[in-house]
Amino acid sequence: MPPTRLRYAAAGLVASLAAFVFASPAGADPVNPIPGEGFFLVGSDISPGLYNTGGTASTFGVWINSTVKAFESHNCQPWTRVT
């Protein structure tokens, strides 16, 4: 196999393996509370709803509905589902 094709094959294998390793487990329940640091997909990682976080920097709630596809949080306390 030519070196270029071998590199592409290896890159494809690595990408496929990474997608498999970092994917959410099939049928896993959404997390609650949501950790205060991270990127989460609505539906597979977290459920739609109203979430609240404590702390002095962020004491407000966030409504995550079915039109929202993802939620990102940085430097917050955990987000707890209210409704």
Image (cartoon, rainbow, N blue to C red):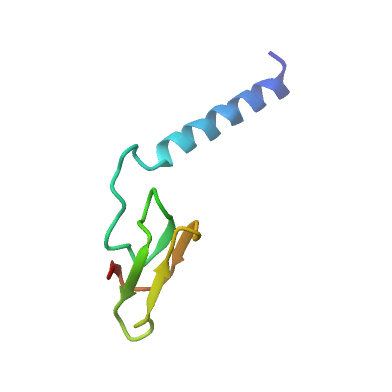
Whether 27 is drawn above or below 31: the answer is above
Whether 31 is drawn above or below 58: the answer is above
For the point 29% across and 55% down, the residue is 31
Displayed quadrant of residue 71: bottom left
Closer-to-camera residue (73/1): 73
For the point 30% across and 69% down, the residue is 78
Q: Is residue 15 left or right of residue 31?
A: right
Closer-to-camera residue (48/33): 48
> Which residue lies most toward the top here?
1
Whether 17 is drawn above or below 46: the answer is above
Question: Which part of the image, by quadrant, shows the C terminus?
Answer: bottom left
Q: Position of residue 26 (x, y in %)?
A: 34, 37
Closer-to-camera residue (1/17): 17
Q: Position of residue 43 (x, y in %)?
A: 40, 51
Question: Which part of the image, by quadrant, shows the N terminus?
Answer: top right
For the point 54% across and 27% down, the residue is 13
Exactly how many numbered labels are in the figure? 0
For the point 46% across and 64% down, the residue is 72
Displayed quadrant of residue 65: bottom left
